[in-house]
Amino acid sequence: MLVANAQTQPKVYTIASGQVKAHIEPTMYGIFFEDINLAADGGVYAELVKNRSFEFDSHLAGWQQQQKAGGKGGIEVVDRTNERPENAHTIKIDVSDNAGYFGLSNEGFRGMGIKKGETYSFSVTARKPVANAVSLLVELHSAKGLVIGTAIITPTSTDWKKYNVKFVATATEDKASLYVWLKGKGAVELDMISLFPQHTWKNRPAGLRADLVQKLADMKPGFLRFPGGCIVEGRDLANRYQWKKSIGDIDKRENLINRWNMEFKHRPAPDYYQTFGLGFMEYFMTAEDIGATPLPILNCGMACQYNTGQLVPLDQLDPYVQDALDLIEFANGGPDTKWGKLRADLGHPKPFNLKVLGVGNEQWGEQYIARWKIFTKAIKDKYPYVKIVSSVGPSPNGEEFTRLDKFFRAEHADILDEHYYQAPKWFLDNATRYDNYDRKGPKIFAGEYAAQSVAIASPDNKNNWDCALAEAAFMTGLERNADVVSMASYAPLFAHVDGWQWTPDLIWFDNLRSYGTPNYYVQQLFSLNKGTDVVPLLKDGEMVTGQDGCYATASIDKSTKELIIKFVNSGATAQPVVFKIDGVSAGKKTAVVTTLRSADKAAVNSFKAPKLVSPVASTLLVNGKTVKVTVEPYTFKVIRLKLN
Ligand code: AHR
C-alpha cells in the first residue's frame, strides 16, 4: 500500500464569509510619490528641457553653445533679480552676422524621449532688446545628429512675450536633444525654453507623462501621498518644500535644488532640480483623476534629521502652521475664501475634499513632539474633521519608535506613519506585527516600505521576486488587521534607469518606456482585490501567518458579492490547499484565479522582459463549498468567488 507523502496532503482552511472581522478602508492601498530618482522633473512631469529657465546654480547647465557653417555670436546670462527674484535669469543671444548657424542645444534629462509621428509643442518667452528681424530655428536632433523635427518662431516684440509652435517628430529616439538656432542678425533674450509632447495624461497642455500616470491609475490607488518623503523636509530649511511656491503661473514657480541631488556620493546628480511643474495643484488633480484621496505631507518646522536637522524656533513657527491651514482652505474652501478662490481661479472650483494631512515626514525626538503639538492644536481648532498623520520616526522599532508610539497613543492621535525598509525576512517575520495592536488606538499608515535585497538603500538592491513575495506575505498581515491599518504604500515609487539615486523602486522608466516591477504587481493585486471587509480564514482555528511558509487573508466585497482569498506560498514546495467556505451556495461555479509567481526568487522585470513576473489569470471550477487548488512554490494567488 502506498503511503501518501505528507506534502501532498492538502492543507484545509476554513473561511466564514459571513463573519465580518474588520472593515477595509477604501484608502487601504495607495501611492507614495516623491521627486526622487527623477520621478517628477525628468519623469512624470513631461517637460523635455532641463534648466529651461536658467535657474540652476550653474545657469547654463544642460545647455551647450552651438555653431556650424561659420555661424558667430555670443550667449550671455542676464541677471534680473530685482525685477523677477523668483525667476532671476534669462539668456541673451547675439548674432553678429547672417552667415551660418549660431545658437545652443539642450541635452534634456539624460536625453529626450521623442516618438515618431508625435506632435511636440515648443514654447519660449522672448523679447528683442531692439527691433530686428531675427527668428529662432528649432530642431530636434537624434543622438547621431540627424534632424528629426523642426519649427520656426519669429519673436515680434521688444516686450517679454510667450511664443508657441507645434511640429511633428519624424523618428523615434530616446536620447534626442533640442537645438535653438538664432537666424538673422541681432539679439534676442530668451527664458522658459520648453518642449512637451502634445500627448500627455488627459492631454493637458504642459502636462504629465501619460504612460507613467496610467501605471498609477492601473493600481486604482486609495490615496496619493505627496510630495514625499524627505523632500518635504529639505536638507536644510531653505531647501524644504513650500507648497505655495508650487502653484500658479509656471514661470513664477521658484526653482529649487532637489535634496536628492548629492545625497548619495555613489549616485551624484548635480543637475537634479525642482521646477515644480508638478506642483500641488497638479498633485491634487492627479489624485482626483485616479480616484485617490489626496494626502499632502507638510514640513513641520524641521529640516531632514539625517542632514542638518535645522529647527524653526517654536516662537517662529506661525508661518509654517499658517501654510497648513491655508492648504486646507486651498483644497476645501469655497470661492468666498482667499485660498479657495485661488483654487477656483486656477481652474478647479470644486473642492478637492482634503480629509487627511501629514505633519512632518520622518521626524523624531522631543523637537518633533513640541512642533506637532502646535500644528495639531491649530489644525484641529479650525478643521476638526481633518485627520493628522504623525511620524513615529524612520524605524519600525527601537527607542525613538517606542517613545513616539507611546506619546501619540496617549494623545489619541489619528494616524501613525510607520516606515520599514527591511530585509525580506523581516517582512515574512512581521506578518503578525499588527495582530496585537490596540484595536482602539490610532490607525496605522504603513507609509513607506520596501524589502531591501541587500541593505537599506544599497545601490545593489534589486526589485526581485524574493522581495516582492515577502511584501505580499507581509501585506496579508496588513489586510487581516484592516481595523488597525487604514493605509499602506510602497516607497519609493518611480526611478529613471539612467538617473536614480535610490533602489528598489516600484516602477522603472526611461525616456520612452516604463515597466512595473514584481513589487508593483503585488501592490496592484492587493489594491484591485482588497474587498470591503475582512473575514476569518483559519487553519486548525488559527490565523495563517507563516505556518509552513504560508500566509493568507480573506475578504468579501459587499458591492460585487464576492469572496476574495489571498494566499502566499513562500516556500519551495507546492501546497495543495482546500478552502471550506461558509456562505457560498452548493452547486458548480467558476472562481477567477490570478497567479503571480516565479520559480526563480532572483527574477526581476526589465525592459527586455517587462512582464517576466506578472499576473496570469485563469479559472477554477468549484463544486459546492470547497475550493481545491495547488499553490505552486514561491507563489502569490488571488481567488475570487461569487457568494450566495
Ligand atoms: O523613500 C525614500 C526616503 O526614505 C524618503 O524620502 C524618506 O521618508 C525615507 O527615509
Image (spheres, helix red, strand yellow):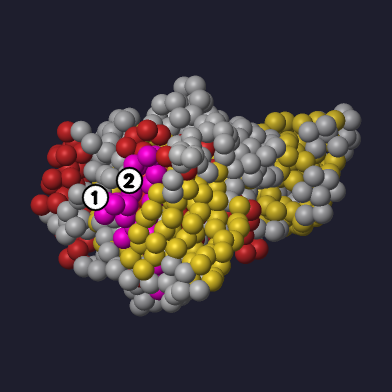
Image coordinates for residue 8, horizontal then vertical, percent: 47, 43
Residue pictured at 14% horizontal, 40% vertical: 403
Whether residue 607 can be seen here? yes
Residue pictured at 66% horizontal, 49% vertical: 194
Residue pictured at 73% horizontal, 36% vertical: 175
In the image, 617: left or right of 144?
Answer: left
Quadrant of residue 28 within the rendered picture: bottom left
How far apart, in angstroms, are the residues tagged by discs 1 and 2?
10 Å
Whether residue 83 can be seen here? no
Q: Is mark 1 within 8 Å of ligand 1?
A: no
Residue type at numbered disc 2: Thr
Image coordinates for residue 494, horizontal then vertical, percent: 53, 43
- Does residue 35 lie above or below 398 as drawn? below
**Residue, disc 1:** 435
Label 1 Cα crowd, 10 Å radius (few <14 / some 14-19 / many 20+): some
**Residue, disc 2:** 545
Residue 504 or residue 312, whichever sits in front? 504
Asked if the residue under mark 2 is in contact with the one under mark 1, i.e. CB atoms within 8 Å, the reply is yes
- The magenta segment is 536-559
Q: Secondary structure at mark 2?
A: loop
